[in-house]
Image (spheres, helix red, strand yellow):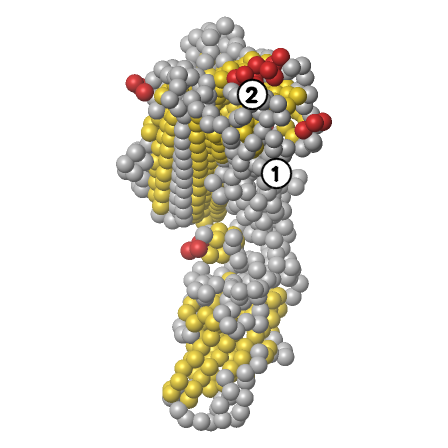
Amino acid sequence: MFIHSEIRIRGGWLAMVMLLTWPVSSIHAAIFTVGSPVGSGQCTHGTIQSAINAAEASPGADTIRLTRSLTYEPENNSIITSQELTMEGGYNTCTQVTSDSQKTVVSGAGGAAEPVFRITVNTGGFVRFRFLTLSGGDEDGSGKGGAIYFNGNGILEIRDSLITQNLAGYGGGIYAQGLGSDAELVIGANVVISNNTARYNGGGIVADQIEMSMLEPESILFFNEALGIGGSGGFGGGLYIFGGTRSSYAYIGSGTSGLGAIYGNTAVYGGGVSVNGYNDDMGTYSDSRLQLFTTVASNPAKISNNFASNAGGGIYLESSAGATNGTIFARAELWNASLEYNAAPEGAAVFAIGAETFLFSDTPSWFYLNASSAPAGAIPCSEGTDCGGLIGNVAEDINGQATSGSVVRGATSGSVYIGDTPFLGSELPLGGTLVQANEGANLIHVTNDDDCEVYLHNALISDNQTSQALIHIDCEGTFSVVDSTITNNTIGGSKLLTSNDSTVTLARSILWQPGLTSLTRIGGSQSITAMIASEVGSLGGGFEATFANPRFIDPAHGDYRLRAASPAVDFATAVSGDDRDVLGLPRDQDLPIKANVRGVRDVGAHERQSIQPLVLNADFDFSDLRLWTWFAGAWDGTQNVAGGSGSGSWKFAISDTQTPRFFVGQQCIHLPGPGRYTLNGRGKGGGNTVANRDYAKLAWELRHNGTEQCNAGTANVSGELGIGSGTSWGQASQPAIIDLTPLDWTPTSSITITLIAEDGGVSFPRNISAWFDGITLEVDGSDVIFADGFETFN
């Protein structure tokens, strides 16, 4: 039983193909077997082509079983049909009733310079391949399809197969050419297309004016190459999507676990994927489009580790326009997906170029990342996680040397949209986008004599390295940064964002790059709303641009969420609707005791969900004891009373000492507002007798104005609290109460907590040991929903 459904999406067709396995006899009218020996009760045919001819002469749906009782080499076979045909391996002999799933090898090696299969499927026809290995195809010159050349207006489906080590001019593995609106290439589950070579374009697959899908699990385009011999072509190492008089669409899902769907391919342009078209100046208006989206929740979609020797390490986009008439739009739409560890001299992750025209405006190309409507069948990211991004892409040449290129490059109306962009009317992907650990001259560089658009919404942009300004926009279009955080990037020169002639909008975002000018603008205009920045003069200063340390939780370890007392918390006006932060958590959370500056919305990529926890790494979940100032002792994974599995405690131990008291560790906490704070913790010591008892204690100091340094100056109030003695875990029966009145509270009010190990025995010399865990600082009226684990960054 085969069910095929089509869903119209924004001008294209998305085919969602579902194969329900039923007994073969209920699907197929006739079964032909290929192998040895041929005869009654044995194999029906001794060659693949003879079985194909017999199936075509047999009305209805037929199956050809290729057994492993023959060696199929060299092969170049032809299928021309309007019927339904299944060709499958997985049989050792012709009398075997059910497939054993072992692939049958069909090779073109040593024969004519032809594809292993030439397939024409006419309207209404359907051809399926399964459990096959196709290799050794060597279509010569500029010919099409190394393993398979498929054309027509029907459907070719491939599953549970390997297509490897084939060669052609175009489409080293597969060339799929649509001759009508119903043509489809369906790559089903468990298909590996690897180590194929195109002399010109499409190392793995060429999708030429056809709808292609690779949505089922564990399929991949892997280590294919588009050479571009003689300076001709070289587009699409893994996949080349080509639009012409008809549109061409490729829908790619999660692919394989770990490697993703498109990995390790090389080309001149578009190491992973190239999206192109040709316009005949005859009035054609069509699309050439890639959609990449997650189809398996545990395996986010990605294009990774591809290389282009010229431009577009991950993706290359090039629109086409006739001199007077017709346009082919190139676009890539990624949804809950990533571009990771790709490289090229220019456009390490993405290169997007439009087309110039003489009589009209330039034709744009578009790159969308979590900015377009969700494709049918897409799996949204889970709450508490990001929705993919641009990670670890590097602008470098084939020798691994840094170039003057950028990570994302747009030219001639190439536009970039990262994050939910409300004007597109897109379905929100629940979370936001990470842009981290990329390297290039610029992170994003877009230039054009005409309009272009660059939108960065709900994005965390951190830990990138550029030799020039992080982002450079040179066009008469729009440059927008909204609900985003830009911080901890290593940037050459003195400029963070630069813009020439653009309309710049910066809203509800954090630009924290000390020592850099936030915005350098020539021409154009700027609109600044509710910004926190390390340099505000270039943003106009005043009420809309505030200089204040955003107080990230743990920037040293990549945690750019906000501490409870961050000035970015409850800073901006709420926005209607259920929009989410970069980790998919609800926006516009009004924290108790935290004063609203102008509303309940946090600025930047993250929205803090609760006041708690105020003490960070309070359960000592990290063995490096991060977020505390270390004085003595070490993490102990064998002792634990608070926190989850694998959490430990802080242990101090010393022998033969004359000193009765030791400072072990310290944390200073800015306070989010006035109130009654209560301090407590869990502790224990060594020994249970009067002679050898030890104590675990907490000392605290309240400063009304501890400055941004937190613990500067003399404490206004201080005290100590015993939290344990003896060898069993204890806790103070009454916490320390620390009152901070509204009149005394300032934005830099703080409490410093010090862990103290103290000898309580009478024996000499002293042997002191103490353990600490579960340190809590609560405040009346606070929300403690996330008191455990909030500080753990995944």
Q: Is residue 639 visible?
A: yes
Q: Is residue 403 or residue 18 the one in the foreground?
A: 18
Quick one: label 2 or label 1, which is nearer the N terminus? Answer: 2
Please, is residue 72 above or below residue 444 in the view? above
* Residue shown at the point (41%, 25%) measured from the top left: 136
What residue would you read off at disc 2?
45
Which amino acid type corresponds to the residue marked 2 in the rendered image? Answer: His
Among the 4 quarters of the image, the one containing residue 721: bottom right
Between residues 286 and 591, which one lies in front from this camera angle? 286
How many other residues sit within 10 Å of disc 1, few (<14), some (14-19) or many (≥20)? Answer: many
> At 38% across and 28% down in the image, what residue appears?
225
Q: Please say if 328 is above or below 562.
A: above
Vertical arrangement, residue 737 with respect to residue 364, above or below: below
Q: Element at badge 1?
A: loop
Task: Identify the image quadrant of the N terminus.
Answer: top right
Tag 1 residue: 379
